[in-house]
Each structure stands twice: as C-alpha cells, then as structure tokens.
Amino acid sequence: MAGKRLLAVLLLSSMTGPAFAQLADEMTCKQAIAYYEKHGVIQVLANGKFAVPVRVGVPVSKASTLQCDGEGQPRPYTISTSDAWRCTIAVTC
C-alpha cells in the first residue's frame, strides 16, 4: 500500500509540479483547509490508488460569499485527512 501511495505521489509530482505533491490524507484538517484556500485545489486519493484533484465550491473562509440562488442551501464539502475522517474544506451549492 505504501509503495502504491508513493508511486501515485511521484507520478503526480512529475505531472503537476511541487505545489501538488502532497495528498490531503497526509495533511491535518487544518493544513488541508489552508492549502485549499491558498491553491483552490487539493489532491485526494481515490480508491486508495489514484491522486485526483478536487476543485469544488468556495473555501470555508469565504462561505458567506456563496450565493445558491435556486440551487438550495449551501452545504459542506468534506475530505479525509490524517486526523479527521470528515474535514470540511469548502462550501458548495
């Protein structure tokens, strides 16, 4: 498993550069929130094998700016981190 994760990180870093080399599940929730706010994207591990970029909604710190006209109420978007199974990094409609 560790070998597959390392391979995914190496492949990802070679394709997208050093800014995206770290996966969300290797960060704490606080680090993931800050990372998403700064970059507008975060990498998550899908099916335990593939690094996938996530770009959804607005960062939590900007939740009050989200307008969901006709799309219902804002709702949290969560990811898994090293210290939290559900870490809210963004808010979406």
Image: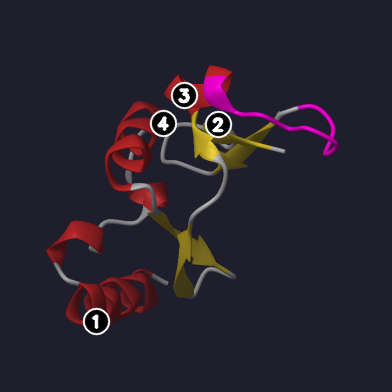
Q: Residue at x 59, y 70 (%)?
A: 47
Q: Are marks 1 and 2 in contact (CB under 8 Å)?
A: no
Write down the quadrant of residue 88 in the picture.
top right
Amino acid tagged 3: Lys
Give the Cα separation between the discs numbered 1 and 2. Answer: 27 Å
Q: Earlier in the sequence, mark 3 or mark 1?
A: 1
Local packing at callout 2 (Cα closer than 10 Å; few below 14, some 14-19, many 20+) is: many
Give the Cα separation between the discs numbered 2 and 4. Answer: 8 Å
Give the Cα separation between the discs numbered 3 and 2. Answer: 13 Å
Q: Earlier in the sequence, mark 3 or mark 2?
A: 3
Would you name the residue on which mark 1 appears?
15
Would you name the residue on which mark 4 appears?
29
Local packing at callout 4 (Cα closer than 10 Å; few below 14, some 14-19, many 20+) is: many
Q: Secondary structure at mark 2?
A: strand
Q: Secondary structure at mark 1?
A: helix
Amino acid tagged 2: Thr
Q: Secondary structure at mark 4?
A: helix
Would you name the residue on which mark 2 appears?
88
Would you name the residue on which mark 3 appears?
62
Q: Earlier in the sequence, mark 4 or mark 1?
A: 1
Say which of marks 4 and 3 sits in front: 3
Q: Residue at x 51, y 32 (%)?
A: 84
In the displayed structure image, the side of residue 22 where residue 45 appears, left or right? right
Residue 67 - label = none
Local packing at callout 1 (Cα closer than 10 Å; few below 14, some 14-19, many 20+) is: few
Q: Which residues are magenta?
A: 65-73
Q: Earlier in the sequence, mark 2 or mark 4?
A: 4
Q: Residue at x 58, y 37 (%)?
A: 85
Q: Earlier in the sequence, mark 1 or mark 2?
A: 1
Q: Position of residue 11 (x, y in %)?
A: 27, 82
Indicate the quadrant containing the N terminus: top left, top right, bottom left or bottom right: bottom left
